């Protein structure tokens, strides 16, 4: 078993994916870091804008998705935690319905440059990565 990633900082400008890898109105997961506890996140695209969040439900501590890149309600309007049904706003990450109303997904600030989605600031992977028990 590998050791958890400790004190790892992903530099600003790290490429997460190409913008074209995310269909407009859809989502894509990403993983940063190595070891047992990498940072798992999701990207939400609306037109040319992309928002990032840590893939962790504040209610039960589970990942939001069961299938790769599938994070949305059937109508595609909100982010859905498939574990307990919490529903989150795609723009703010705020829980708008379900067991964790008043809480939010942790944001990961991203930018789109030259057709690539990149980290906008350095990310402390160890601080953001979620330990699943």
Image: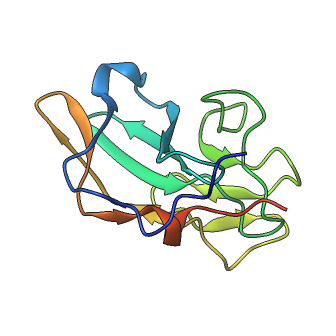
- Work out whether residue 10 or residue 115 is closer to the camera in this orientation and state it: 10
Q: Is residue 26 left or right of residue 109?
A: right
Which quarter of the figure has residue 17?
Answer: top left
Q: Is residue 104 above or below residue 87?
A: below
> Could you say where residue 64 lies in the image, as x and y percent from the top left?
72, 48
Q: Residue at x 25, y 44 (%)?
A: 14
Q: Residue furthest left?
A: 114
> Could you say where residue 120 lies in the image, as x and y percent from the top left?
23, 56
Q: Residue at x 82, y 64 (%)?
A: 98
Which quarter of the figure has residue 131?
Answer: bottom right
> Could you say where residue 85 lies in the image, as x and y percent from the top left?
84, 52
Which quarter of the figure has residue 22?
Answer: top left
**Exactly how many numbered labels are in the figure?**
0
Q: Residue at x 61, y 34 (%)?
A: 76
Q: Residue at x 56, y 50 (%)?
A: 38
- Work out whether residue 55 or residue 128 is closer to the camera in this orientation and state it: 128
Q: Is residue 118 left or right of residue 38?
A: left
- Work out whether residue 127 or residue 87 is closer to the camera in this orientation and state it: 127
> Could you say where residue 65 lies in the image, as x and y percent from the top left?
73, 40
């Amino acid at each position: 078993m590998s050791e958890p990633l400790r004190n790892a900082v992903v530099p600003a400008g790290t490429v997460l994916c190409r913008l074209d890898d995310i269909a407009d109105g859809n989502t894509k997961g990403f993983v940063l870091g190595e070891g047992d506890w990498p940072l798992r996140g999701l990207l939400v695209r609306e037109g040319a804008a992309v928002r990032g969040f840590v893939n962790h439900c504040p209610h039960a501590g589970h990942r939001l998705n069961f299938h790769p890149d599938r994070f949305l309600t059937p109508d595609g309007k909100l982010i859905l935690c498939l574990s307990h049904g919490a529903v989150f706003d795609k723009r703010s990450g705020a829980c708008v319905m379900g067991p964790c109303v008043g809480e939010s997904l942790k944001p990961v600030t991203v930018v789109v440059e030259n057709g690539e989605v990149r980290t906008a600031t350095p990310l402390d992977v160890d601080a953001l990565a979620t330990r699943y028990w």
